[in-house]
Image: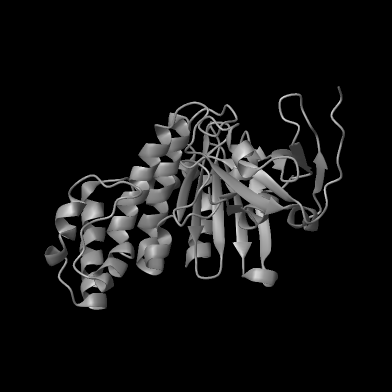
Amino acid sequence: VPIPIVEISDDDFLFRRLSPTGHLNPDGTVNSNAFKLNGKPDPEVSVDLSTLASVREAMTRAPNATFKIGILQARDARFLGLRVRHLPTDENPAHSVIEGNQSKAHCKLLAEKTWLAAI
Amino acid sequence: MDTTSNTSESTRVEPNTAQLGQIIDTSRQLFDRMSGHSLSECRLAQQLETPATYDTRIEICDPATEENIQADPAWRLRGMLERLDAVERLGRNWDSYASEPPTATAVQKARALVWDVVGEGFGVAGLRSIPFAIVPLSGAGLQIEWRGENDSIEVEIGSDGALGFLLSRGRESNREFEEADNVSEHELVRRTLAAVS
């Protein structure tokens, strides 16, 4: 059964899986590398949509319990000119993507708008 | 003969105990000036002779001293060099997106860059010549960030040692960004020193 596509509003939150040993700065903030893939800005950043998954559900897809969940608002990504859309998969109905991330500056700005979920 | 590469080699400061010792001595003086506390009383001298990690906290005498320890150049530099080692030891899939850990080439280039910037910039920029953060990069590379008073620079080191950067000038709404790939090491050091000085 196809999973219905939902509209993502500006107010919706997006969950991004973060490595505690790789994606965080010494002061606990999120590093821009969280939005890069193969050394380049990730043109299709995978996130989970908060209206379809909880933070804990997002965590279940992490390799282990030490991983963190970063939260950002769809509005903040769109403000940078990026697109945010729901792109469900069979394994993850909440899967969504931030598209158009083409510059290192976008990665830095996305990271600055991301905060860690308290789990 | 390539005179450019010769010049670059002659100006590079390689990691060595003597230099670290010099920085430690400098930091001791700074420490005393700032707090009036003796480092030996706080066991810092003893701690500096033992391996430090990114998250190590040492025993402290009092809160004022703790603040100064976090601002100690030798301590921070040791922490960052240890961080490089730790990042190199990350396993495959460290990011949960199947990335490999940084290659030996990337780590070697990163270490050289850190020492180049500290060696050339410590006298002018002090603590700011020491990286703010070192993180692995998806695709087996590394990223190092330096933060100045108003400017900052993120240096990307690819798995093959290729260099790129994002330079951020100014603060908040007045910020401007400049980025590039395939930059020479000499150019990168120059830009980093400009950002932190």
Q: Is residue B180 visible?
A: yes
Residue furthest to the left in view is B41
Residue B1 coordinates in the image, percent (x, y):
48, 36
Q: How is the rendered protein coloured?
A: one colour
Residue B135 coordinates in the image, percent (x, y):
49, 44
User: Image check: A46 left or right of B139?
Assistant: right
Residue B62 against residue B115 in the figure, above or below: below
Q: Residue at x 17, y 49 (%)?
A: B49
**Nearer to me, A23 or B73:** A23
Q: Residue at x 64, y 41 (%)?
A: A36
Number of callouts: 0
Residue B75 coordinates in the image, percent (x, y):
29, 56
Residue B69 coordinates in the image, percent (x, y):
28, 64
**Nearer to me, B7 or A73:** A73
Q: Is residue B6 visible?
A: no
User: Image check: B155 left or right of B113?
Assistant: right
> Which quarter of the figure has residue B191?
bottom right
Q: Residue at x 47, y 30 (%)?
A: B103
